[in-house]
Image (cartoon, rainbow, N blue to C red):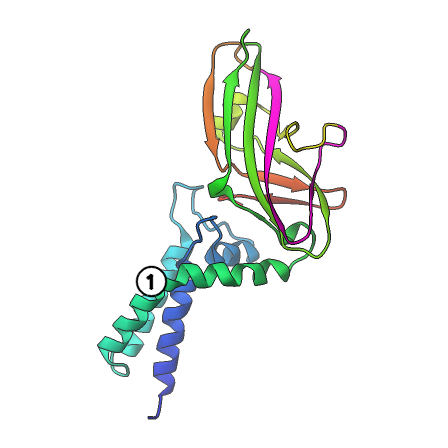
Amino acid sequence: MRISKREIISVILIILAFMIGTSTQSGFSFGDEMFWGLGISPWSNGQFGFHYPIIVTVILLITGGIIAKTEVPPRRIGVLILFLVVLSPTIVSILKPVYFKMNSGLGAIEYEYKKSHFDIRSSSDNKNLDITGFIVLTNYGKGSLEVGIKIPADSYVQQEWFSNDLILAGGDISEKSGVVTLPPGKRRTISTFSTIPSKKGTLEHGSMNGPNLILFTDDESRKVGNNF
């Protein structure tokens, strides 16, 4: 059976749509990485605006469907779409390590923001804020990395609690050097504990799920998270 060029193009466009629009449970998305690689935020206004990869996904699906309309039986397209709906998260998860291994240094580190969390509580005298949390990082690189971690004061909520970037310490982070060691090919859940002066001096409490982070070494820095 001869397969036409239009049929091949339509199938490729539909597969690309799902690859761009799918996110893993850890929050990784090829669509987001594609936009960051072009120097463009994948969101029009932080996490509350339009998600550009989804718009691209819809355009590719519609285009692929239009091209396939006269070339591919609807049942075959339906089976392909059902297949991709079920298996695309698994496929993206399998391809994810390949993507990170193509990078080096901090570019080879994945930050699983959907699995990272911080709690913020006032001290007993309300003079300080105690910030406890855990961060999930995976080093897909070939060598061990010593990485510093900080939370940027880049949003209203975070600026309510601290005005400057907060360098994380305590827990699994070395008190002496302020870094954590990430062995090659390993996934680590890193606990942290930091104390900073309270801006308000009143009882406060709150939480942050997967905040943006800045990873840094002596040679480079990299912003990671849902908005980076």
Q: Is residue 185 magenta?
A: yes
Helix, strand or loop at label 1? It is: helix
Q: Quadrant of residue 67?
A: bottom left
Q: Quadrant of the N terminus?
A: bottom left
Relative side of 57 to 224, left or right: left
Q: Is residue 42 above or below residue 158?
A: below
Q: Nearer the viewer, residue 59 or 111?
A: 111
Q: Residue at x 51, y 38 (%)?
A: 116
Residue reaching furthest to the bottom: 1
Q: Residue at x 56, y 54 (%)?
A: 39
Name the kind of residue labelled 1 in the image. Val
Q: Position of residue 180 (x, y in %)?
A: 69, 38
Q: Position of residue 216 (x, y in %)?
A: 69, 41
Q: Is residue 141 above or below residue 6?
A: above
Residue reaching furthest to the left: 74
Q: Quadrant of residue 189?
A: top right
Q: For the stretch drawn in magenta, what is the main secondary structure?
A: strand
Q: Residue at x 46, y 19 (%)?
A: 205
Q: Nearer the viewer, residue 48 or 78?
A: 78
- Other residues around mark 1 within 10 Å, as few (<14) / some (14–19) / many (≥20): few
Q: Residue at x 53, y 59 (%)?
A: 96
Residue topped by disc 1 = 85
Relative side of 40 to 71, left or right: right
Q: Is residue 119 magenta?
A: no
Q: Position of residue 90 (x, y in %)?
A: 43, 60
Q: Position of residue 154 (x, y in %)?
A: 54, 33
Relative side of 161 to 47, left or right: right
Magenta stretch bounds? 176-197
Number of disc labels: 1
Q: Quadrant of residue 98?
A: bottom right
Q: Nearer the viewer, residue 197 or 50?
A: 197
